[in-house]
Amino acid sequence: MEYQNLHTELKDNTLYVTINRPLKLNALNRQTLQELAAVVTYANETREVLGVLLTGAGEKAFVAGADISEFADFDIEQGAQLARDGQNNVFNAIESSSKPFVAAINGFALGGGLELAMACHLRVASENAKLGLPEVTLGLIPGYGGTQRLTKLVGKGRAFEMIATADMISAEKAEKIGLVNYVVPASELIGTAEGLLSKIKQRAPQAIAAAITATNAAVDAATNGYDIEIKAFADCFGTADFKEGVSAFLEKRKPSFTGS
């Protein structure tokens, strides 16, 4: 599929997705969100995709926020629709994807950009990255799940401070408070993200999908995470990969998983 604002490449079972609006610091406009929604669907439906590496074009920004000009004149109803569509079609879709998403944060991750990174399952940041949710400076709050995901990742006190002050934090502090998994030099950013995906791709794909479902349930107040885990655990017993994994263990060899 051809995209206007994304560059995609499938290589070694990893789908590389680059948000490609460097002159706009990769800001999320309506077209980009639609294309990201299509990418999530493609990743979920394509067996060859075992993981997704998401980053931004250029050296300045992962995503420096949403394209404010597109919603400057919105009313309450339009604002609700904007948030609902974005959350359902992109941010929640990434978080609940059966394929792991790794965000490689190569600069500013602000507003919707940080929300996009938080929707991913793992986050690696370059040393020069700056992260923040500045929406209150516009008379808004985060609308793509930022208040919820940030609170779950770093705790209520730190989340409220970041949101209410609108301050950016350094990559080093983001790692310290659990907002990102790793901080590395910019030259090592993509390689580190690839290394994480390389490890994950060696594991059973259906088990990875089950782990995503179960860990998501752990922070979902509307579900019983233990019950979700029991079902996801039990379902793994019906997969060919379970049989292969056990056979490989008993035979002292590396497993060859097929995702079935």
Image (cartoon, rainbow, N blue to C red):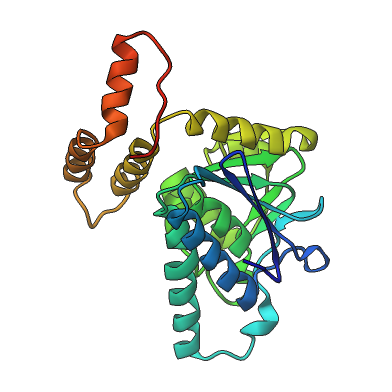
Q: How many marks?
A: 0
* Residue 150 in the figure: left or right of residue 207: right
* Residue 80 in the figure: left or right of residue 175: left
Residue found 43% across the figure and 75% down from its top: 84
Q: Is residue 251 above or below residue 207?
A: above
Residue found 70% across the figure and 68% down from its top: 5
The quarter of the rendered structure image containing the N terminus is bottom right
Task: Find residue 217 and report its horizontal and vertical position in percent.
Answer: 29, 48
Task: Find residue 152 and report its horizontal and vertical position in percent.
Answer: 41, 48
Residue found 46% across the figure and 69% down from its top: 89
Task: Find residue 65 and report its horizontal and vertical position in percent.
Answer: 66, 65
Task: Find residue 15 and report its horizontal and vertical position in percent.
Answer: 59, 48
Residue 108 sits in quarter = bottom right
Residue 32 sits in quarter = bottom right
The quarter of the rendered structure image containing the C terminus is top left
Q: Is residue 171 above or below residue 130?
A: above
Residue 152 versus residue 7: which sits nearer the camera?
Answer: 7
Query: Can residue 189 be seen here?
Result: yes
Residue found 26% across the figure and 54% down from its top: 221
Q: Residue furthest top?
A: 252
Residue 114 versus residue 209: which sits nearer the camera?
Answer: 209
Query: Can residue 111 be seen here?
Result: no
Residue 9 versus residue 196: which sits nearer the camera?
Answer: 9
Q: Is residue 142 above or below residue 248?
A: below
